[in-house]
Image (cartoon, helix red, strand yellow):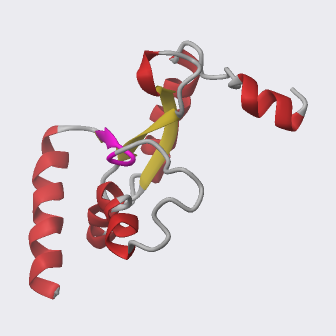
Amino acid sequence: MSQVRTIVQKSFRDALDRNDILISPAAPSVAYEIGEKKDDPLAMYAGDIMTVNVNLAGLPALVLPCGFANGGSSGLPVGCQMIGGAFDEEKLLKIGHIFEQTLEGYNFVPPLVADEVGC
C-alpha cells in the first residue's frame, strides 16, 4: 500500500507543480435512487472513486455544486472537486469562494427540494 500511496502522491505533486488546483468530477454519476445500491458494495465503493485517490495522497479537496444533470435545473445536482497542494487549504478555499460567487444558478433550489424544506 505504501508504494501505491507514493505513486499517487508523486502524480498529484507533478500535476500541482504546473497548476494552482486540479478540478475533477466529485463522483462518476449522479446520486443513486434511495436503496438502489445497498446490496452491491462494489458499486457503492465505485461511487467514491473520484475522491479516494485524493485522500490517499493526503491532499486538501473541496467539493462544490456546479450544475445539474441532464442540462437543466430539474436534474440532480452535480459536484466538482477542487484539489489543492499540501497545506494549500487557504488558496483552495479562496478559489472555491470565487467559484461560488461566479457560477450562474448556484443558489437555485430544485422544486422538489424547495417543496420539502419550504423555500
Going 55% across and 31% down the picture, which residue do you hit? Answer: 97
User: Quick one: which residue is furthest to the right in this view?
Assistant: 118
Q: Residue at x 34, y 49 (%)?
A: 84
Task: Confirm whether the magenta stretch covers residue 113.
Answer: no
Residue 36, percent from left and from top: 50, 59
Report the side of 113 relative to 15 (left or right): right
**In which quadrant will I find the N terminus?**
bottom left
Residue 21, can we see it? Answer: no
Quarter of the C terminus within the rendering: top right
Side of 83 relative to 100 (left or right): left
Q: Position of residue 43 (x, y in %)?
A: 34, 65
Is there any visible trace of residue 10 in the rendered image?
Answer: yes
Up the image or down, 83 lies above or below 40; here it is above
Q: Residue at x 67, y 20 (%)?
A: 108
Among the 4 quarters of the image, the one containing residue 42: bottom left
The quadrant in which residue 56 appears is bottom left
User: Residue 118 placed where, x, y %?
Assistant: 90, 31
Out of 80 and 29, give the one closest to the viewer. Answer: 29
